[in-house]
């Protein structure tokens, strides 16, 4: 197996990678880094989650570590389709370049021109930008692209979807012909092929297996559940969440719990804390220093559960999240893919569970449509049977009928002990039976065997 140390990267970059906890390069890194370091153009066909950001950032830092920036003439340029992605690349850059003296500027909407102008005036090594904002700066005469030695185009297919291709072509034409180009796209649409044929010169083409929309290393499950009374939905959902967390036991080393609304982020975080969990909320209303503290705590493992809204989680780079729990089904199916993409990153295994109440069933259907697959149903003591009659629910599981009491009882009876011993003794047999009536639909007679296995059995197989 290739090691980072075999790749000819700057020793200071290697040190930063080690500190980031990366053990070995991902396939896109193994493929792209050597060619990039040789100064060749690279065409990387890879999706988010494959480690592609480091596959261009690491050689860039190594190459740029020699030499110095000149005023208004950035030495390299990274173009990203969205602000969030640009911010994420900038964050990655900071991690990998922390032992190297390089300057960077981020040109995205929402960041003031003035500050960025001042940085560019001084001279930056790396300019990370969205195409529109970059051209705005250029047109205001604040920027010269003739010093660009390395240009990266990230997520070109999304650029295409967003109508940025003419901007990209223009930017290409403003940079020197001799520049090195590192170009990344998840797919090769004809328009993308055309651009690469025009602007890349004999590129090294590295294609890594396309991951399914939601990475195949992510095991997914959904708990269909109907509250015993409408006004108890919130508290019963929180109980379901706790059961899901308990059910995962120690395998759940750290997790992000997503809520659709900020107010629920706070309520869920508070409730989990009350039950003895190590949980903190993160959302846009918290001040920056608090958000940074929380994120740092989550990154270094001192916070186990991060309760987040979609907006807060965007641009969040947490390398190894074992679990994602969707307290609510997101109202846009694409957000589901983003949310669960927080686990199972860079080939790691991850699990993602979603709680589905009746009013979210339509949104959940949209998620399954987008993924083009059925997400296996999970049964829990308090959410025993998907779409079963209420009568049956009550008869089988009295806890579901009196959740508030059960909530309180549970606090004493289960939480204070270790996670492993919290598990009810009958859990294994109960899951076996759950498997048998596990209501997997939409597979016809061809249901893959693994879907019928319990999580433990799947893990073991
Ligand atoms: P990306 O595809 O660039 O969005 O990267 C996905 C995630 O994988 C990020 O959270 C990176 O921090 C992480 N990552 C990148 N390279 C590696 C690696 N070689 N080993 C472990 N994690 C990595």
Image (cartoon, helix red, strand yellow):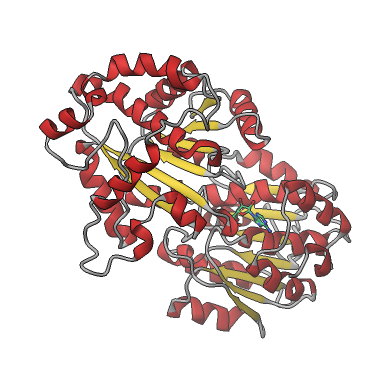
Q: Position of residue 181 (x, y in %)?
A: 67, 72
Is 29 placed above or below 20 here?
A: below
Q: Residue at x 50, y 39 (%)?
A: 313
Is 250 placed above or below 352 here?
A: above
Q: Residue at x 88, y 61 (%)?
A: 66
In the image, 304 versus 315, the foreground residue is 304
Is 417 situated left or right of 119 in this image? left
Q: Position of residue 436 (x, y in %)?
A: 26, 52
Q: Position of residue 63 (x, y in %)?
A: 82, 64
Q: In terms of image quadrants, where is residue 443?
A: bottom left
Answer yes or no: is residue 377 visible. no
Quadrant containing the N terminus is bottom right
Q: Residue at x 64, y 65 (%)?
A: 152
In the image, 106 versus 256, the foreground residue is 256
Is 251 situated left or right of 412 in this image? right
Q: Position of residue 277 (x, y in %)?
A: 52, 24
Ligand 1: image quarter: bottom right
Is 357 placed above or below 317 here?
A: above
Q: In terms of image quadrants, where is residue 431?
A: top left
Answer yes or no: is residue 381 visible. yes
Q: Residue at x 53, y 22 (%)?
A: 417
Q: In terms of image quadrants, where is residue 227?
A: top left
């Amino acid at each position: 197996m290739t090691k980072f140390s075999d790749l000819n990267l700057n020793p200071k970059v290697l040190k930063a990678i080690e500190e980031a906890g990366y053990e070995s390069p991902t396939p896109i890194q193994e493929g792209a880094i050597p060619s990039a370091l040789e100064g060749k153009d690279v065409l990387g066909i890879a999706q988010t989650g494959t480690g592609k950001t480091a596959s261009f950032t690491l050689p860039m830092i190594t190459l740029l570590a020699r030499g110095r920036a000149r005023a208004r003439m950035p030495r390299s340029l990274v173009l990203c389709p969205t602000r969030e992605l640009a911010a994420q690349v900038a964050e990655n850059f900071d991690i990998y370049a922390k032992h190297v003296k390089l300057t960077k500027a981020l040109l995205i909407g929402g960041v003031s021109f003035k500050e960025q102008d001042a940085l560019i005036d001084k001279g930056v090594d790396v300019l990370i930008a969205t195409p529109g904002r970059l051209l705005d700066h250029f047109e205001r005469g604040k920027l010269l692209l003739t010093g660009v030695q390395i240009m990266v185009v990230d997520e070109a297919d999304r650029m295409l979807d967003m109508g940025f291709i003419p901007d990209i072509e223009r930017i290409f034409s403003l940079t020197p012909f001799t520049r090195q180009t590192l170009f990344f796209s998840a797919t090769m649409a004809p328009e993308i092929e055309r651009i690469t044929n025009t602007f890349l010169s004999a590129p090294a083409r590295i294609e890594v297996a396309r991951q399914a929309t939601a990475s195949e290393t992510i095991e997914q499950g959904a708990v269909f559940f109907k509250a015993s009374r409408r006004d108890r939905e919130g508290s019963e959902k929180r109980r379901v969440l706790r059961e899901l967390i308990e059910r995962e036991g120690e395998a759940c080393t750290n997790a992000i719990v997503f809520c659709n609304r900020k107010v629920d982020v706070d309520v869920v975080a508070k409730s989990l804390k009350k039950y003895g969990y190590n949980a903190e909320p993160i959302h846009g209303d918290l001040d920056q220093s608090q958000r940074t503290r929380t994120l740092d705590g989550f990154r270094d493992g001192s916070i186990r559960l991060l309760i987040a809204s979609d907006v807060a989680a965007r641009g969040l780079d947490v390398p190894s999240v074992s679990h994602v729990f969707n307290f609510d089904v997101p109202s846009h199916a694409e957000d589901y893919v983003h949310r669960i993409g927080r686990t199972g990153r860079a080939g790691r295994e991850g699990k993602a569970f979603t709680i589905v109440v009746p009013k979210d069933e339509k949104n959940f259907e949209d998620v399954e449509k987008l993924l083009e697959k059925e997400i296996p149903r999970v049964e829990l003591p308090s959410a025993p049977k998907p779409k079963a009659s209420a009568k049956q629910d009550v008869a089988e599981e009295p806890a579901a009928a009196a959740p508030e009491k059960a909530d309180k009882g549970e606090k004493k009876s289960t939480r204070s002990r270790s996670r492993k011993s919290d598990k009810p003794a009958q859990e294994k047999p109960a899951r076996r039976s759950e498997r048998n009536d596990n209501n997997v639909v939409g597979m016809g007679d061809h249901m893959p065997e693994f879907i019928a296995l319990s999580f433990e059995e799947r893990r073991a197989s």
